Image: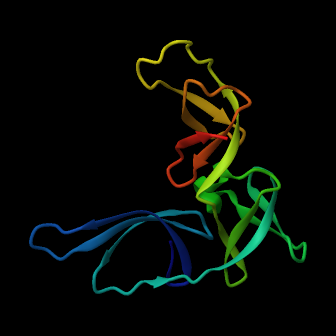
Amino acid sequence: MLIKVGNDLFRILELHHLTPGNKRAHIQVRMRNIRSGMLADEKFRAEEDIERAMLDEREMQYLYNDGDHYYFMDTSNYEQIHISHEAMGESKNYIIPDAVIRVEFYDVEPVGIELPPTVDLVVKETVPGIKGATASAQVKPATLETGLVVSVPSFVNEGDKIRVNTETGEYQSRV
């Protein structure tokens, strides 16, 4: 979720609703400033009004990253934009070059991407599974093509394509 506080845009990273004893309830949030990348912890009371930032979405193709920025191309007019490493957050672990995704804009400024519920990624590195060890569900770490490390069942090998949930970062199935 993106909110507007003053003239700054913040992406909510963590949110906790607290009701301490006989005191008034409040919401404790950890948020990141989209423009500066700074983290902030803030407490909002129930009486405060917070403006939710309205976002526009456009379908764009992911091209590449240069370490600091991720570059996207609008598939309708071939215009290129870039999003900072900080604004991408954990989303960067789920995109591969040439993937078509939806980019979120606030006015004309790109502020992030919307991921599909699942993505299919190739396993680049994992340890071999133990043959015949089926007494319990064994898992092992696997490094995917984007650098993301997930726990996979022992039957998954290097070169396999697996489906990963983008919300939880967990293995779902082999494709």
Quadrant of the rendered image containing residue 171: top right
> Up-down: is 65 above or below 127?
below
Residue at the spot x=56%, y=76% of the render? 9
Q: Position of residue 85 (x, y in %)?
A: 68, 56
Give the vertical position of 117 relative to 121 (above or below).
Answer: below
Q: Where is residue 68 in the image (x, y as percent from the top left)?
A: 74, 54
Residue lying at 90% horizontally and 77% vertically, measured from the top left: 77
Q: Residue at x 10, y 67 (%)?
A: 21
Q: Would you say 174 lies left or right of 83 here? A: left
Q: Where is residue 139 in the image (x, y as percent from the top left)?
A: 50, 27
Q: Quadrant of the C terminus?
A: top right
Vertical comparison of 126 with 3: above or below: above
Give the number of callouts.
0
Given residues 126 and 44, the one toward you in this image is 126
Give the residue at x 55% y 14%.
130
Q: Outermost residue toward the right?
A: 78
**Residue nearest the viewer, comparing 140 with 175:** 175
**Which residue is at the front of the view, 152 or 107?**
152
Q: Is 110 placed left or right of 12 in the picture?
A: right
Q: Report the side of 48 relative to 106 (left or right).
A: left
Between 32 and 64, the one nearer to me in the picture: 64
State the image coordinates of residue 37 (x, y, percent, origin top left).
59, 63
The chosen color scheme is rainbow
